[in-house]
Amino acid sequence: MSEEPVAVVGIGQTRHAAARRDVSLAGLVREAAARALEDAQLAWADVDAVVIGKAPDFFEGVMMPELYLADALGAVGKPMLRVHTAGSVGGSTALVAADLVAARVHRTVLTAAFEKQSESNAMWALSLPVPFQQPLLAGAGGFFAPHVRAYIRRTGAPPGIGALVAYKDRRNALRNPYAHLHEDGLTLERVRSSPMLWDPIRYSETCPSSDGACAMVLTDRAGAARAPHPPAWLHGGAMRSEPTLFAGKDFVSPRAGRDCAADVYRQAGVTDPRREIDVAELYVPFSWYEPMWLENLGFAAEGAGWKLVESGATALDGDLPVNPSGGVLSSNPIGASGMLRFAEAALQVRGQAGEHQIEGARRALGHAYGGGSQFFAMWLVGAEPPAT
């Protein structure tokens, strides 16, 4: 029996900020979920199951938060699943929810992902003491900076590419009312002159620390027929992982990322992603990862990702807009950051992305990665139902 087509009929997210002290963790998650249900014009009782995800529990110090969040998400007496794949968890969570619908286990599933970084210190939580790692880095930026330097050496990319990406994404965020960072008056020179944190990553080329949540309602063909708005249809979705460290690992272009993208494209019938995908929401917490992922995902030839950035192709008015929402560089509630990429891709093909809508977007890619370039999750959504 063939899989059930999966439709995204409800999307909700919170306002992202450095600290959402106006709500508890439960209130934050419920805010996004309530907006997703409102978008779908459904009630809590219409949901058959709930799938949630977040980054490591030690970020907030609340162990197994799903146990007390069940009530806030209307999941009492219903199946509830928790997903964890580090920073990619928002994407993985959406894919688990989609699989439940595709396999006809449940007809309508609410999925949510979240983080309240103001109640944690993720940078130092990720800076383990000796003897568990070398005393050479602080936070994720310290881990990834050597891989960026390796990319620059490998490709001969000029030093200003990271600043171009950050400037683009922060300007895009001005069109997104939910984005954490709204830097009016930002100039390219200000990005270029911001303090160096982890060579070559500057302060303005780094993601913020955000509180926020994202939620979606996924349903089957019958549910989509009753939806108040045209849905986004899942054309392909996949997860891949690989160890953080192993002999021969390519930190610049991880094999798990390449294989994950290839699987998604195969499912969706995509043979030329550069021409067949209209917009991409990529997980770019440090600006140099845009050109790196453009190569890893097959949008550019090896060594040519930075040229795509430099040409302006990834700008809002380019032929392959990347992160029109402002991306992770503008909002980073870690557990939700991957789901935000998936949700923003769905908003684009539904034509509901507001001021950052890409005209004529019919197919969009959502991408997330986590750990030490260890976990990958991606989906491709379209305005039309998938071919049967």
Image (cartoon, grey):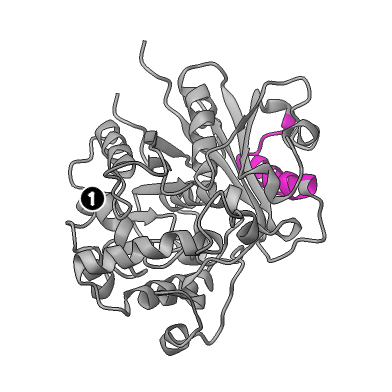
Q: Main secondary structure of the magenta part?
A: helix
Q: Nearer the viewer, residue 273 or 223?
A: 273
Say whether residue 103 is magenta: no
Q: Nearer the viewer, residue 153 or 335?
A: 153
Percent of width and height locating residue 125: 64, 54
Q: Residue at x 45, y 65 (%)?
A: 286
In the picture, the quarter occupied by the C terminus is top left
Sort mark 1 into few (<14), some (14-19) or many (20+) by Cα contacts within 10 Å.
some
Instruction: Look at the image and give the residue range highlighted in magenta.
Output: 26-44
In the image, is residue 373 above or below residue 179?
Answer: above
Do we see residue 285 in this rendering?
Answer: no
Q: Amino acid at mark 1?
A: Gly
- How many numbered marks have been drawn onto this rendered protein structure? 1
Q: Residue furthest front?
A: 131
Instruction: Left or right? Give the position of 151 relative to 335.
Output: left
> Can you tell which quarter of the image residue 151 is in?
bottom left
Q: Residue at x 68, y 27 (%)?
A: 46
Q: Residue at x 27, y 69 (%)?
A: 152
Which residue is labeled 1 in the image?
298
In the picture, the quarter occupied by the N terminus is top left
Percent of width and height locating residue 359: 36, 61
Q: Residue at x 56, y 48 (%)?
A: 132
